[in-house]
Amino acid sequence: MKLYFSPGACSLSPHIVLREAGFDFTLEKVNLRNRQTASGVDYTTINPKGYVPALELDNGELLTEGPAIVQYLADQVPDRRLAPPCGTLERARVQEWLTFIGTELHKNFSPLFNPAATDDAKEAARANLARRLPIAAQVLEGRPYLTGEAFTVADAYLFTVLTWTRLVDVDLSPWPSLGAYLERVGARPSVQAAMEAEGLKR
Ligand SMILES: N[C@@H](CCC(=O)N[C@@H](CS)C(=O)NCC(=O)O)C(=O)O
């Protein structure tokens, strides 16, 4: 398998999951400014959506959309318990978090990275984050991971999104459980290795 990624972007989530799952895989960096891959290919010829992540499967098919990719990976290695079995309420809880992270957190960070976004759009995004981050913070006051005692693919995604708070000056100090969570998940060997491979470790 090959993961198309950009350092520190949301592709870090499937990157972490590939390592948690123990897969053999390769990485190909995508320059999101000019949409060229590291090997000099126009990325839109590989993934017409133009954004990362995309996972090239061993049969040549391309799978996109982070939440779909991480669940596909988890389902290939059920023994690793990266997601509960399909069709269970526990699985729906993981999907509930993946959707919340994708639509309510991730997409409210996007304007903060976008130089073309107006100040009003940025302010609205910050206000949305200030209303939504406490939802995750409250849950993490009572458990180490989003759905309980065990790390799941939803944690790979939340960790990834929370790392962006450092880049766009979103202060996590009102929610100490989120800071502690960043430390906890960030200490996992898979996360350390993924960050090293993406050149994110200082
Ligand atoms: N719906 C997509 C969103 C992916 C996304 O927002 N990717 C960002 C990086 S975090 C990106 O590649 N942005 C560049 C662009 O949109 O052109 C997913 O969940 O995988």
Image: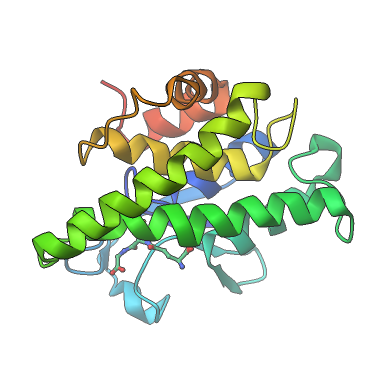
**Which quadrant holds residue 172?**
top left
Can residue 1 be seen here? The reply is no
**Which quadrant holds residue 35?**
bottom left
Q: Say which of 99 and 127 sits in front.
A: 127
Q: Say which of 182 and 47 sits in front.
A: 182
Q: Is residue 93 left or right of residue 198?
A: right
Q: Say which of 75 and 147 sits in front.
A: 147
Question: Which corner quadrant holds the C terminus?
Answer: top left
Residue under the point 80% across and 38% down: 81
Residue 90, x across and y down, in percent:
83, 48
Q: Is residue 201 above or below residue 113?
A: above
Q: Is residue 101 above or below residue 174?
A: below
Q: Is residue 150 left or right of residue 65?
A: right
Q: Is residue 101 above or below residue 22?
A: below
Residue 102, x across and y down, in percent:
49, 58
Residue under the point 60% across and 28% down: 140
Residue 24, x across and y down, in percent:
62, 43
**Which quadrant holds residue 96?**
bottom right
Classify the position of ligand 1 by quadrant: top left, top right, bottom left or bottom right. Answer: bottom left
Which color scheme is applied?
rainbow
Question: Which corner quadrant holds the N terminus?
Answer: bottom right
Residue under the point 74% across and 50% down: 93
Residue 68, x across and y down, in percent:
63, 63
Can residue 126 be seen here? The reply is yes
